[in-house]
Image (cartoon, rainbow, N blue to C red):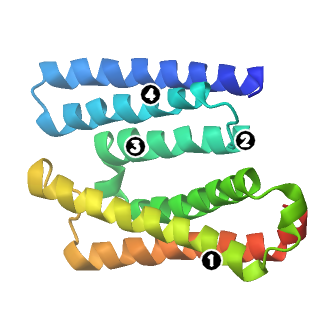
Amino acid sequence: MSILKHKIIIIFSLVFIAFMTGLLIFYLKKDDTSRWMVALGGILVSALPISLLFVKNNPFNIPIIIGYYVFVFCTTFLGSIANFYVDFKWWDSGLHFYKGIFVGFMGIALYKLYIPQKARKDVSRWVIFLFVLSLSVTATVLWEIYEFAGDLTFTHTMQRGGNKDTMYDIIFGLTGGLLISIYSSVQKLKL
């Protein structure tokens, strides 16, 4: 892994962990259970990329790494703590669309890691299309399960629209993933 990737992961992780820790302390003092739990979750997901420092061949490029932190900031801080999910009806759907695109690009990176360059010419466009789309759809479904479980146990605010919210989230996540799946199959020879 390049030194620049290492530095970006370390700097972004530390900044986000410090920011979320400050929010955790602030909201613990205010006894705002919903927000301090989001901040605690923000600490955990901010630290997650540190595990990439121990991977011999990190498949994710710098835009994907930065894109992860953008997603974390938009979901945890802006979405939940700053109430963008409540104040802007389009925020949740927009993030699901972004996530579909983001996970699609992660799928392309994993494809490039696990399929040797020489073998890629023999891989069908449909295979890469289905691989990238499947990852995006799986991420969307897992996120909806997370929201459902969170509402059952902690917050009661993640699926405010019930089934309608879930279906919109799935549709927007699928749409984002579908766009990158089409892109990956069209650009197959350049991947």
Residue 164 in sight from this viewpoint:
yes
| Residue 37 sits in quarter | top left
- Residue ID at (25%, 24%): 24
Residue on which the image places disc 2: 61
* Closer to the eye: label 3 or 1: 1
Residue 130: mark in rendering: 1
Marks 3/4: CA–CA distance: 18 Å
- Residue ID at (20%, 25%): 27
Foreground residue, 164 or 133?
133
Residue on which the image places disc 4: 47
Instruction: Establish if 50 lies above or below 109.
Output: above
Quadrant (top left/top right/bottom left/bottom right) for the C terminus: bottom right
For this view, does 89 lie left or right of residue 176? left
- Residue ID at (77%, 75%): 185
Residue 90 in sight from this viewpoint:
no
The reply to whether the C-beta atoms of the residues labelled 2 and 3 are less than 8 Å apart is no
Foreground residue, 168 or 142?
142
Marks 3/1: CA–CA distance: 32 Å
Marks 2/1: CA–CA distance: 22 Å
Residue on which the image places disc 3: 78
Q: Secondary structure at mark 2?
A: loop
Q: Earlier in the sequence, mark 3 or mark 1?
A: 3
